Structures are given as structure tokens and as C-alpha cells.
Image: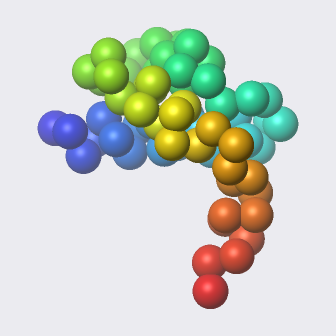
Amino acid sequence: MSATQELACVYAALILQDEDVAITADKISTILKAANVTVEPFWPGLFAKALEGVNVADLISNIG
């Protein structure tokens, strides 16, 4: 179950990045709520903290 919750947060963060919106716990939670996905309360904050100050676009494009 936690893998599904983690994946949902990853997708939410990617959606925010694609829309050039700051990745915050509140915005991740909003997307998850709109998608009717239930996650443990710590996941959105964990992802927001982990991606704070990270250029996600560069991270995606520099895989190799």
C-alpha cells in the first residue's frame, strides 16, 4: 500500500512541475484529494521537503 501512496505523490509532484507550480505539501495534497487518492498524511510533506530547492526538470532530463 505504501508503494501506491508514494507513487501517487510522485505523479502529483510531476503534475505540479509540468505546470510550473511550486511543489508544496498543500498542493500535492490538493491534487491527491482531487484524484480521490488517500495517502498517509506524512507523504505530501515528505515529498515537498525532498524536492525543496531541487530543479525537477533537470533531474528528469539528466537521467544518464
* Rendered-image quadrant of the C terminus: bottom right
Q: Is residue 31 visible?
A: no
Image quarter of the N terminus: top left
- Looking at the image, which residue is at 49% across and 17% down? 29
Q: Position of residue 36 (x, y in %)?
A: 40, 16
- Give residue 20's position: percent from left, percent from top: 83, 36
Q: Where, by quadrant of the figure, is residue 60 drawn?
A: bottom right
Return the residue found at the far left: 1
Apparent side of residue 40 relative to residue 35 in the rendered image (left or right): left
Pick the front one: 9 or 33? 9
Q: Residue at the spot x=74%, y=52% of the render?
A: 55
Instruction: Determine if residue 25 is in view.
Output: yes
**Hey, which residue is sitting farthest right in the picture?**
20
- Residue for point 32% across, 16% down: 41
Q: x, y (%) of residue 37?
A: 37, 22
- Counting from the top left corner in percent of width and height, residue 57 is at 75, 57
Identify the image's colour scheme: rainbow, by chain, secondary structure or one colour: rainbow
Depth check: give the residue in front, 63 or 53: 53
- Which quadrant holds residue 31? top right
Residue at image position (66%, 31%) is 23
Q: Is residue 16 above or below residue 59?
A: above
Relative to 42, 33 lies left or right: right
Q: Where 36 falls versus 23 (above or below)?
A: above
- Number of numbered callouts drawn: 0
